[in-house]
Image (tube, grey):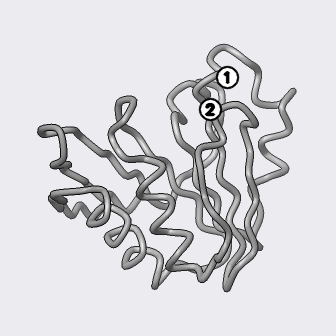
């Protein structure tokens, strides 16, 4: 397990870090993003999308649960915030995990029964209003 820590001073730096992170991603990668509300999970995902050469506007899938984007590699962006206690099998989440896409799951801790292995676990902590500490863990 490899761990790297970064600090960003604003949203744009968080997006840029996500973009740089995505440069080396390959198909089939599953990423778990963890952090409090407003920590920057969606900002980091916007950066991942830029790194995957996705031109669409990326925003939080909180109410839709899933958003899909086409790019150099396709992105499936899942927000599990509203899924606490819901059976993952009934949602068909396993069907979304495939070797053709990059999958980003925000709030994966709410999917207690989800038995998949993540390639990356990214923890985002709020240091102050603008600064974030981002830990990238290679699983």
- The quadrant holding residue 19 is bottom left
Q: Is residue 106 left or right of residue 36?
A: right
Asked whether 99 or 72 is in front, the reply is 72
Residue 114 screen position, x and y as percent:
65, 34
Please give the name of the residue rendered at 66% of the width and 42% of the height, measured from the top-left corner. 61
Secondary structure, mark 2, is: loop
Secondary structure, mark 1, is: helix
Residue 94 screen position, x and y as percent:
79, 45
Q: Quadrant of the N terminus?
A: bottom left
| Label placed on residue 83 | 1
Residue 46 screen position, x and y as percent:
50, 62
Asked whether 1 or 62 is in front, the reply is 62
Residue 8 screen position, x and y as percent:
19, 59
Please give the name of the residue rendered at 58% of the width and 79% of the height, measured from the top-left corner. 52
- The quadrant holding residue 124 is top left
Q: Quadrant of the C terminus?
A: bottom left
Q: Is residue 56 left or right of residue 95?
A: left
Q: Could you tell me if the residues under marks 1 and 2 are in contact, i.e. CB atoms within 8 Å?
A: yes
Please give the name of the residue rendered at 63% of the width and 34% of the height, measured from the top-left corner. 62
In the picture as drawn, the residue positioned furthest to the top comes out as 85
The residue under label 2 is: 80
């Amino acid at each position: 397990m490899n761990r790297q820590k970064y600090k960003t001073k604003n949203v744009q730096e968080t997006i840029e870090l996500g973009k740089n992170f995505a440069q080396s991603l390959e198909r089939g990668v599953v990423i778990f993003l963890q952090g409090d509300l407003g920590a920057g999970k969606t900002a980091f995902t916007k950066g991942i999308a830029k790194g995957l050469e996705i031109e669409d506007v990326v925003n939080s899938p909180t109410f839709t649960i899933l958003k899909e984007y086409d790019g150099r590699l396709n992105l499936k962006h899942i927000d599990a915030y509203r899924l606490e206690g819901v059976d993952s099998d009934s949602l068909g989440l396993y069907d979304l995990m495939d070797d053709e896409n990059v999958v980003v799951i925000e709030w994966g801790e709410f999917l207690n029964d989800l038995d998949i292995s993540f390639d990356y676990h990214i923890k985002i902590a709020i240091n102050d209003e603008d600064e974030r500490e981002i830990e990238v863990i290679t699983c």
